[in-house]
Amino acid sequence: MDDLSRAVDEALMSDLECPVCMQYMVPPIKLCMNGHSICSKCKESIQCCHTCRATFTEIRNVALENIARSQKYPCANRRSGCLELFSIEHIGKHHAACVYGKLKCPFHLLKKCSWNGFKNDLKEHAKAGHRDCFYEVSAFYSNLYEDRICLISYFGELFVHYKRIQDGRMYCVVQLIGTSSEASKYKCKFTLSAKNGIEHIIHTFLVHGNSEGLETIFNSGKYLCLDEAVVRNFMVRKWVKLHIELSKVE
Ligand SMILES: [Zn+2]
Ligand SMILES: [Zn+2]
Ligand SMILES: [Zn+2]
Ligand SMILES: [Zn+2]
């Protein structure tokens, strides 16, 4: 028996498995007429109880829900080697960032890459497949009007830098391939400097984790957002050089 098996109460965990989809049930857990539990997703898609063919009720299995809330769940990538345990609230975020899980290459957002692999292999992939957009420095320039995605390998971590131009505004975000709490150890400083050497725009934001979707980040307001009219003042021969500097939060 490994350490993980000892820490997880296997019998209890099997009670928490939905009999239909075999995933761990999270509240609300509903019951059939005879008291068998089912996850809320499966309840929507099947007509009668998998175990006894009785119909479902709106009654919740409160005792099991309470157990579910107090239980630590093993990561879904357990068979690939992740031995961590998480509460219900945290496991979703962990799955998004787990290094033993597979993730899509960030360039899939531009429909330019279909790579899907382990986090630990992403760096090699980016080096080979996206060399023009791959940096191994903590500070570099990027043209605001080009390279809509780039990958940065530094501090032993991987970061993704996104740019988006929409409705006359320019958006820039830096995400760590990792959890939000790991990401909050890093900050990113964006600097635009005018040709005259006098005018500058400088903004610093904490780095986001990649479990936060881009839409969540754009809703949080914690990213660089500039009016195209403002940006144009910093243009030199169709180039707007945005300086990006990653550093650790002291
Ligand atoms: Zn289910
Ligand atoms: Zn039943
Ligand atoms: Zn994991
Ligand atoms: Zn790729």
Image (cartoon, helix red, strand yellow):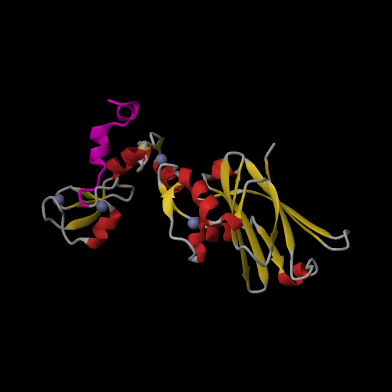
Percent position of residue 229, x then y: 75, 72
Residue furthest bottom in the image: 167
Residue sitting farthest toward the left: 52
Residue 160 is situated, as x and y percent measured from the top left of the image, at 58, 53
Residue 83 in picture, x, y percent from top left: 38, 34
Q: Nearest the camera: 16 or 174? A: 174
- Magenta-highlighted residues: 1-20
Q: Is residue 11 magenta?
A: yes
Q: Is residue 60 left or right of residue 134?
A: left
Please name the residue shown 26% across and 35% down the image. 12
In depth, the one of 132 and 110 nearer the eye is: 132
**Residue drawn 61% across the image and 39% down it:** 155
Asked if one can make out residue 41 in the rendered structure from this viewpoint, the answer is yes
The quadrant in which residue 2 appears is: top left
Vertical relation: 191 (above or below) 9: below
Q: Quadrant of ligand 3?
A: top left
Q: Quadrant of residue 162?
A: bottom right
Viewport quadrant of the C terminus: top right
Q: Which of these two is toward me, 152 or 87?
A: 152
Q: Determine the residue positioned at 72% across, 59% down.
A: 242
Q: In the visual, does 128 lie left or right of 24?
A: right
Check the picture and name the quadrant holding the N terminus.
top left
Residue 161: tell me if it is visible: no
Residue 84 point in image, percent of width and height = 40, 35
